[in-house]
Image (cartoon, rainbow, N blue to C red):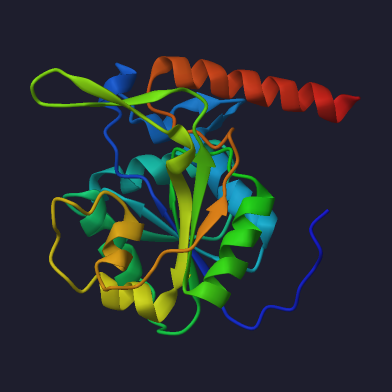
Amino acid sequence: MIETMVKEQVEYAIIVAGGAGVRMGGEIPKQFLPIGGLPVLMHTLNKFNAYDAALHLVLVLPESQFEYWQGLCEKYAFSLPHRLVKGGSSRFNSVQNGLRGITEEEGLVAIHDGVRPFVSKEVIQESFEGAATHGSAIAVVTLKDSIRRVNANGTSQFKNRDEFRLVQTPQTFQLKKIKTAFLTDEEPFFTDDATVYENMGWKVHLIAGNQENIKLTTPEDLSYANYLLERRGKADQQ
């Protein structure tokens, strides 16, 4: 059980959901597809609200999807307080817009993929605590499979998987620092928010993520998501 703590800093969460969902093979963007009776994005927002109902939620969507999202909120009677912010031409730009949507300069902010609805409450809490202490807190998990590096000429070499981690979200930061980091121009090597932060010369602090916190990208991921929800529902009934 998570202990209740007196928070010294205001906390925010930017939920980024600008994907077109092409790999899902359908016309509806993946963040709006239903799992367990609710659109994916609502599950994600509920996870952060369950961590702390006082958390300030910022949802970044393409402006063209605002009306569709609002229709879904009416359909599912989804009244969780959140602020809508227009997304950009890339994830980097969308996060920039989300940060600009927070007028305050002090506090902590978690940046999370809208299609990762299985982040645990424990990981969210640890990310805020880690960022408060270290400036940043990046959720990662260990690799289960062996890995090899493939060269341009087709040759490959074994790499020790213990030296690598898979990066997830949330990626949580002290608000003032990550706002400063995102004042720069976008670079090709900015693969996530941590690399933007690291570009300032600041070290990133890693925390343990949870293995279920996958990014829903393919139809197979949706099947797994429904399985997780069904398993959780059965566990709650026992």
Q: Is residue 149 left or right of residue 151?
A: right
* Residue visible at 16% across and 50% down in the picture: 89
Write the residue at 26% across / 50% down: 91
Question: Where residue 29 sits: x, y (%)?
Answer: 33, 31
- Side (left or right) of 205 relative to 226: left
Given residues 48 and 73, the one toward you in this image is 48
Of residues 67 and 208, the one nearer the viewer is: 208
Percent x, y of residue 125: 65, 60
- In the figure, is residue 80 to the left or right of 113? right
- Of 27 and 152, nearer the camera is 152
Q: Quadrant of residue 186?
A: bottom left
Which residue is drawn at the image coordinates 76% and 26% (left, top)?
233
The location of residue 77, given as percent across then percent down, is 59, 43
Can residue 144 be seen in this snapshot? yes
Q: Residue furthest left?
A: 153
Residue at the outermost right position: 238
Q: How far from the left and from the top, in percent, is residue 185?
A: 12, 66
Q: Which quarter shows the C terminus? A: top right
Number of marks in picture: 0
Q: Is residue 135 above or below residue 50?
A: below
Above-or-below relation of 185 to 20: below
Does residue 235 appear to the left or right of 209 in the view shown? Answer: right
Res 55 seen here:
no
Residue at 48%, 63% in the rendered image: 205
Front residue of this view, candidates 227 and 150: 150
